[in-house]
Structure formats: structure tokens, C-alpha cells
Image: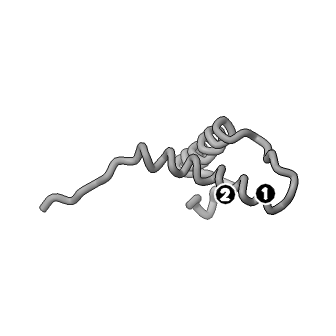
Amino acid sequence: MPSKTAETAPTQRDRHLRALVEAEIGRWKRVIGGTLRSQTNGRQATDVAVAVNVPNRMLELGRPNYVRII
């Protein structure tokens, strides 16, 4: 979540967050494409639902599992 002053005086963390979001959108467009292919609203909603799940699934596959050892 960006800081309250992100619009007027962004911190280094705000700039990093923005870069991460822009990188994710770029990956999404590379995998899915920049436009919707369907013409009707119902099918476009399905396209978006599928397109959103693809990068989430890719990120999930590369995310390590942490186990607490006592």
C-alpha cells in the first residue's frame, strides 16, 4: 500500500511499489496480450478471469514454502 504522500512526495518504497506493479502488468501483457479478443461482455469477463489467474498461478509456482521449525 503506498504512503499517504505517494502522489506529491513519493518515498523510495513508493517508487519500488510502482516499479513492481508496472513489471507485473508488463508480464501480464506479454503472456495474455494487450487487448481482449472476445466481443461480448460475458465472454470478455471470462477472458479477464482467465487472464488474471495465469500470472497468479505463475507466481504461486515460483513462491517458496516456509515451514517453521521449533
SS of the residue at dot 2?
Answer: helix
Type of the residue with mark 1 = Arg
Give above or below for 40 relative to 15.
Answer: below
Is 19 placed left or right of 58 in the picture?
Answer: right
Q: In which quarter of the image is the N terminus?
A: bottom right
Q: Which of 31 and 6 is in front in this view?
A: 31
Work out which residue is located at the far top of the displayed protein and give it. Answer: 30
Q: Name the residue under label 1.
A: 43
Residue 66, by quadrant, is bottom left
Local crowd at mark 2 within 10 Å, few (<14), some, or many (≥20)? few
- The circle drawn on residue 49 is 2
Percent across and percent down for residue 52 are 63, 53
Frontmost of labels 1 and 2 is 1
Residue plotted at (58% across, 53% down)? 53
Is 69 placed left or right of 42 in the picture?
Answer: left
Give above or below for 1 relative to 25.
Answer: below
Percent across and percent down for residue 63 are 40, 47
SS of the residue at dot 1?
Answer: helix
Residue plotted at (61% across, 47% down)? 21
Percent across and percent down for residue 7 are 69, 56
Type of the residue with mark 2 = Ala
Is 59 placed left or right of 55 in the picture?
Answer: left
Say whether disc 1 or disc 2 marks the residue closer to the N-terminus.
1
Q: In which quarter of the image is the C terminus?
A: bottom left
Local crowd at mark 1 within 10 Å, few (<14), some, or many (≥20)? few
Residue plotted at (21% across, 59% down)? 68
